[in-house]
Image (cartoon, rainbow, N blue to C red):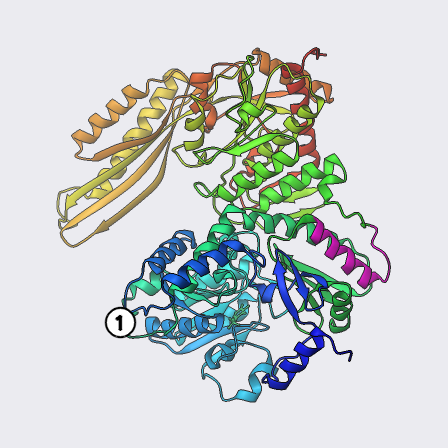
């Protein structure tokens, strides 16, 4: 070996280190973003990121200055005293955690988080046994090691913790057979990182959560590697819609500074058994690590790293899947946790990658794992993929210029936009990540874009409507395309199969919203606009508040408005029914069931019967058989309980209201009945019916545009409500709802959209906008 700065370091370490690590012959001395340098100044793209620690990248000045400032103020402070920085971190973490997790124990590493989780699970359940999974990895300390699967890691240290067993991953039957009344907890990774990059199925995780609940065991989710944006959402749990009883975190939490966390859910907290003195840690919750974690969380949020990981990950997965090589058995992953399973040992290929300046990781003997910092740039990632392709095919990558798919052809970019939108969960009031992703994408599509104070995504052909408030607004009135970003709950794995894209929100309403963005982008490229076009992705349409639409209704006075709701690409919706939600409560003193007095259940159902009969009669007189003109009540929920003194029945009735209906009179009538029967009532979600006609300029433009694509337009009235009910009364009649997708699939587990129909809708919208917004464009 030539004696250089690097070999000197290597010699020195080799002389004094314990010898437990097998090391690669490179000494890294500096890093910035996704790049690190060795002692000789050679540059590498770091797809190891300290085994998934450096999510925010290397050399972050935010973390450095937070550490420096805190080190001068206070480095250490036991948790038996209070501390300002720790208090802030705890509150911040809880605000970001999946629902139900509301208390946190701070520690210093992943293994420690797992150890503590096992202790807590035993305390809470009074049981001893732990179930883990084949290929699972949970750390190397004795307890955590017992749950880790790899026999090489475990066997030399036997006997380990008794009562730990391993079941097959993604095998619900095995779980069904294993979980019993001795089981304190099941521990699982949502993507197995060390064990070969295996992604959990939705059924497995949903099933585990259910079995644990039913059988009194706790579900411990180990997000030590998948947490903090790695898989495309802040926590992978969000994508699975799972509420862990205990969540283990570490790795990326401190931005590189050692820190772990055990997050406790309702079942753990409410057991009341996690009391004073049951656990502790000298360094846990030290102010220095807390300051680093706060700075790290700031960066993750400000730079929208989860959305970035989703996007870059989708691109990388697509490119890896397109590599034709007999060496590749399978490509897997989620976000920027990616695995390439080879038909041979991975080690020689990892060495070739290192020679070419890419540091990647193994995951088991045959898998190359990529765990780059989430801040990796498009160019850096494209370069990594080029090098991987070269190494695995023995040739030059045909992608040597390495553009992302969206730059290759405009049609692909449009489909990629929707695909990526589906990978970012956006339940009502949790639309932040999607809004920021859309704003960034709209800008790359040539639009002006921002996220407004209500959280809505707004994009425009004109700077004045795209967040640049110092620009003067054009004199002509705008066209507003008002879609919504939120979806109902229930994750549907995103996949593209035979031209059909599956995912929650494909139909309601990410498909329509993506089509709005794409059509507006096409229009912006043509220039010469007579009118500005504004696209809004509103928040909280699926909740009765419609917060997003209410925030914009007074901001614009549009010439025309298209609401983003699925109508099928050749359909156009020109009316939505109104709505009224009624919450009722009946309280009665308990009496003997044989007595003459009516029970609260009987009174509640009698009230519902009265509502039903009134509607039937009203419809006979007014509506005939037309569903749009009918008064349609439904009993959405009814629940009763008693406490030994009183019994109580609560119910909710939802009305779908016909046009020109006197809602005040209905409310009064219901109030009177309720008063007579001693029932408490309250009303929410009131919306008047809104309908327009097929002869407005906008409806005509759709008629012409759909015909021009060779299809036959269909105009529809819908029995639900939409943001049309919110903005219609103020914005007037020149309004329709439009979007690709079959609205019968909304809110179902089969939600999907045909890519061809999505492109058709963009074509139709582009033609409509040209008629209404482009100078000198004629109607035909
Ligand atoms: C890394 C890891 C651990 C162990 O964390 P340490 O900080 O190394 O103790 C546990 N679980 C998972 C899933 C990990 O990836």
Q: Identify which residue is drawn at 36% across, 72% down.
A: 120
Q: Is residue 20 left or right of residue 3?
A: left
- The residue depicted at 43 percent of the width and 52 percent of the height is 96
In the rendered image of this protein, does residue 741 appear above or below residue 490?
A: above
Would you say 302 lies left or right of 283 here? right
Q: Residue furthest right?
A: 395
Residue stretch in magenta? 379-398
Question: Is residue 481 visible from the viewing direction of this image?
Answer: no
Left or right, 246 with respect to 716, comes to left
Q: How many marks?
A: 1
Which of 43/233 is in front? Answer: 43
Residue indicated by mark 1:
276
Q: Principal SS element in the magenta part?
A: helix
Q: Residue 357: x, y in percent?
A: 74, 63
* Residue 189 place in picture, x, y as percent: 53, 65
Q: Nearer the viewer, residue 289 or 55?
A: 289
The image quarter in which residue 444 lies: top right
Q: Indicate the position of residue 696 as horizontal and vertical percent values.
A: 56, 11
């Amino acid at each position: 070996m030539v004696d250089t700065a690097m070999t000197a370091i290597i010699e020195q370490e080799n002389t004094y280190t314990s010898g437990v690590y097998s090391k690669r012959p490179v000494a890294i001395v500096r890093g910035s973003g996704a790049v690190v340098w060795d002692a000789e100044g050679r540059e590498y793209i770091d797809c190891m990121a300290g085994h998934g620690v450096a999510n925010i990248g290397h050399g972050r000045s935010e973390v450095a200055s937070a550490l420096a400032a805190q080190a001068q103020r206070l480095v250490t402070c036991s948790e038996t005293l209070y501390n300002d920085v720790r208090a802030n971190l705890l509150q911040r973490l809880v605000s970001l955690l999946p629902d139900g997790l509301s208390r946190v124990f701070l520690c210093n590493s992943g293994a420690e988080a797992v150890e503590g989780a096992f202790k807590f699970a035993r305390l809470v359940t009074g049981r001893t046994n732990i179930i883990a999974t084949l290929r699972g990895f949970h750390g190397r300390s004795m307890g955590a090691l017992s749950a880790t699967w790899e026999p090489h890691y475990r066997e030399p240290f036997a006997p380990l913790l008794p009562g730990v067993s391993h079941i097959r991953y993604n095998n619900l039957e095995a779980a069904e057979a294993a979980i019993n009344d001795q089981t304190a907890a099941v521990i699982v990774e949502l993507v197995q990182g060390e064990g070969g990059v295996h992604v959990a199925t939705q059924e497995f995780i949903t099933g585990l959560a259910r079995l644990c609940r039913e059988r009194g065991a706790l579900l411990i989710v180990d997000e030590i590697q998948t947490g903090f944006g790695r898989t495309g959402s802040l926590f992978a749990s969000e994508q699975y819609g799972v509420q862990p009883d205990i969540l283990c975190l570490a790795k990326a939490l401190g931005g590189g500074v050692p820190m772990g966390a055990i997050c406790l859910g309702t079942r753990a907290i409410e057991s009341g058994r996690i009391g004073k003195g049951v656990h502790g840690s000298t360094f846990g919750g030290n102010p220095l690590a807390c300051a680093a974690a706060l700075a790290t969380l700031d960066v993750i949020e400000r730079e929208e790293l989860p959305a970035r990981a989703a996007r870059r990950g989708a691109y990388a997965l697509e490119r890896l899947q397109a590599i034709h090589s007999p060496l590749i058995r399978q490509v897997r992953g989620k976000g920027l946790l990616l695995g390439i399973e080879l038909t041979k040992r991975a080690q020689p290929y990892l060495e070739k990658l290192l020679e070419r300046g890419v540091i990647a990781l193994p995951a088991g003997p045959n898998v190359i794992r990529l765990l780059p910092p989430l801040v990796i740039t498009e160019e850096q990632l494209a370069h990594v993929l080029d090098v991987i392709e070269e190494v695995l095919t023995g040739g030059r990558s045909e992608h040597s210029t390495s553009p992302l798919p969206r730059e290759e052809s405009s049609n692909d970019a449009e489909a990629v936009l929707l695909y990526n939108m589906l990978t970012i969960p956006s339940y009502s009031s949790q639309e932040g990540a999607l809004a920021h992703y859309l704003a960034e994408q709209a800008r790359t599509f040539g639009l002006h874009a921002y996220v407004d104070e209500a959280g809505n995504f707004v994009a425009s052909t004109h700077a004045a409507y795209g967040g640049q408030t110092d620009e003067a607004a054009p004199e002509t009135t705008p066209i507003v395309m008002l879609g919504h970003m939120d979806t109902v709950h229930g994750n549907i794995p995103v996949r593209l199969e035979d031209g059909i894209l599956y995912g929650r929100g494909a139909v309601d309403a990410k498909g329509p919203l993506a089509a709005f963005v794409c059509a507006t982008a096409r229009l912006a490229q043509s220039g010469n606009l007579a009118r500005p076009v504004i696209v809004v992705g509103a928040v909280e349409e699926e909740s009765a508040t419609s917060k997003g639409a209410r925030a914009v209704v007074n901001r614009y006075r549009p010439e025309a408005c298209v609401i983003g709701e699925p109508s099928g690409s050749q359909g156009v919706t020109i009316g939505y029914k109104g709505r009224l939600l009624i919450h009722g409560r009946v309280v009665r003193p308990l009496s003997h069931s044989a007595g003459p007095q009516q029970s609260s259940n009987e009174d509640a159902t009698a009230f519902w019967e009265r509502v039903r009969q009134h509607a039937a009669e009203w419809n006979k007189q007014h509506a005939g058989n037309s569903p749009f003109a009918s008064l349609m009540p439904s009993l959405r929920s009814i629940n009763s309980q008693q406490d030994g003194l009183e019994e109580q029945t609560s119910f909710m009735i939802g009305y779908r209201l016909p046009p020109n209906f006197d809602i005040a009179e209905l409310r009064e009538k219901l109030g009177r009945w309720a008063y007579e029967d001693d029932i408490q009532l309250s009303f929410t979600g009131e919306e008047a019916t809104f309908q327009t006609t097929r002869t407005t300029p906008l409806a005509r433009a759709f008629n012409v545009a759909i015909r021009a694509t060779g299809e036959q337009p269909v105009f529809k009235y819908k029995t639900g409500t939409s943001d049309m009910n919110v903005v219609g009364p103020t914005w007037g009649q020149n309004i329709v709802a439009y979007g690709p997708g079959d609205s019968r699939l909304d809110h179902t587990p089969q939600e999907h959209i045909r890519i061809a129909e999505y492109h058709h809708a963009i074509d139709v919208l582009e033609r409509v906008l040209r008629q209404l917004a482009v100078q000198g464009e004629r109607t035909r």
